Amino acid sequence: MRLWLYIVRRLVVLVPTLLCVSLFTFGLQQLLPGDAALALAGEEHDPAVVAAIRARYHLDRPMPVQYGIWIGNILRGDFGESLRNRIPVAELIASKLPVTIELALCSMLIGLLIGIPAGIVSAARRGTPLDVGANFLALSGLSVPHFWLGIMLILLFAVRLGWLPASGYVPPWESLGRNLTTIALPSFVLGTGVAGVLMRHTRSAMLQTLDADYVRTARAKGVLERVVVLKHALRNALIPVITLGAIEFGRLLSGAVLTEQIFAIPGFGKLLVDGVFNRDYAVVQAVVLVSASLFVLLNLLADVLYFLVNPRLRG
Amino acid sequence: MSASASLAIPAVVDRRRYRAMKWLARRPAAIIASLVVALFVAGALGAPWLAPFNPNAPHFDAIRRPPSDVYWLGTDEVGRDVLSRLIWGARASLLAGVIPVTIALTLSIPLGLLSGYAGGWVDGVIMRVNDAMLAIPFLIVAIALAAFLGPSLTNAMIAIGIAALPIFLRLSRGTVLVIKTEDFIEAARALGCSRRRIAVCHILPNMLPPLLVQSSITVAAAIIAEASLSFLGLGQQPPAPSWGSMLNAAQRYLSQAPWMALYPGLMIFFVVMALNVLGDGLRDALDPKHQ
């Protein structure tokens, strides 16, 4: 099958999925207890303000009409206005998303640097204490609550040793060095989870390829074990890991909520938490919608990558 | 005839369960994990008898005391015993682990049976909605739902249950699709069993092993999700103890009272790790390829 045809097919399937995501996001507003206009008004109980909110969000119109207006605005890039900051939500998202992308990229790098070598060593030394140790570390990375790990690392590296700042964020264009010091701990915290997932998948894929006939043939020909592992087995074992990496990246973009909160990083996750506490529901809905859309698109990217690197799918 | 057919399936399931238990018993990691989980459950259920102090009673003469003979794990910012709060907090974690999974199972089994067995447009609609829910990351769904429903442990559990539903539904439906092509289903149909009887007596018991494995993994994820929501103030409300809210309070006293942050996190870590090991063990034990 041709690549473009494959992408078009996958995009067609995405339409109903994204439509359902938008329905779910819109439906969140209906969960507000009591009158939605009163809930959106927050502390403000002035009838004129409540009436203005009702008119502004079209809450006096039938539900399908409300949805139609809402999704129409979204498709034009209008996510509404933040009740707290009084600026368009789209602007807020555009300013916060790059910070989260940088955090996700650094975490991914740490995850790759730890997870893939650990997975290779673990598979190549199957059954040895090294394998057991690597498995234990991977399971720990998957089981540790990241926000707690963040707190513990702040305690060690910021409070006790004073090597790194406890919180805050400096953009790279202001000072690259300070940017790296502020992003190091949160990236490591998120990277441990990714490393755990990647290590387990790399190990499992490597074990399968190391048992394959072509690897046995390479060994029988007298190829060095290191070459067998790193060249023959790893190349095929990395196929599922590449696609998994794209999915993990999507998860990182939305999974940094608590880490950003702990390290006071002004990213996408912190925007969500601030939106929740300020009862800024337009922001919460926008974050849900954008993170779901990003996740869907990164899943598509993962599928396309899989299609590209797996010759069997291309026929 | 149909009675004998329906009796044959539970026998197969029993044999598989017995083999799985035997396989699991040979794994020391799985045994240790089972013990940790058993201790966690026993601690949560026996909190009124095990906790040395009232978990909510402040002792203003013992504020932020380090671990000692009286307060084994120290005290918090208002002098409450950390150990007692940990033991009572296990209840919130146990509830948050079990109830969302029960919600997800209760909804996913009938929907999965309907979707997988009926097929056609019913399957199409259910799975499109499910795909959409799967697209929204677990914690984001839980936070958004908890935010809109209002902060409380009950709402947090509902939110986590709904967030966990899509994975269970996809698994249930996938399992039904595999089982319904098996020979014994064909045999049951040939014997004249009704669709409902086939679904309930023949397909349902065989759906349970993968759902059991998923449940153990999801209980672990739900415990972390509850701790996360409580940490953010969207779960258990003060002064009721929960491991997540204890960590939230501890964050402000990191340099003065690090024990406040250490123990709740370690508890979450050990319980979640034990559940993950148990989940891995169950998956290996129930998967014929591993036996």
Image: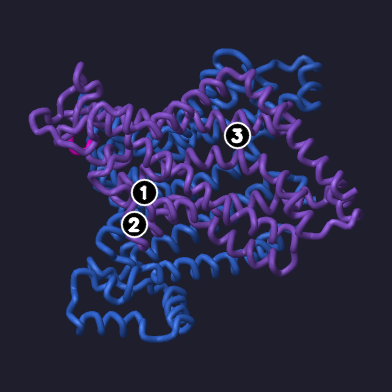
Chain colours: A blue, B purple
Does residue A41 appear in the picture of this structure? yes
Q: Looking at the image, which is closer to me, A270 or B74?
A: B74
Chain ID of residue with mark 3: A
In this rendering, position of residue B214 left or right of residue B150: right
Looking at the picture, which amino acid does disc 1 mark? Val
Residue A168: quarter of image: top left
Residue A262: quarter of image: top left
Q: Is residue A181 above or below residue A37?
A: above
The residues bearing labels 3 and 2 have C-alpha atoms spaced at a distance of: 31 Å
Residue at image location 34% in from the left, 57% down from the top: A272
Q: Are marks 1 and 3 on the same chain?
A: yes
Nearer the N terminus, badge 1 or badge 2? Answer: 1
Looking at the picture, which amino acid does disc 2 mark? Leu
In this rendering, position of residue A169 left or right of residue A70: left
B111 inside magenta stretch: no
Chain ID of residue with mark 1: A
Residue at image location 59% in from the left, 50% down from the top: B168
Residue located beneath label 1 in the image: A257
In this rendering, position of residue B89 left or right of residue B193: left
| Residue extent of the magenta highlight | B250-254
Q: Cβ–Cβ below 8 Å for labels 1 and 2?
A: yes
In the rendered image, residue A179, in percent from the top left (x then y), is placed at 28, 41
In the rendered image, residue B228, in percent from the top left (x then y), is placed at 36, 44
Residue located beneath label 3 in the image: A201
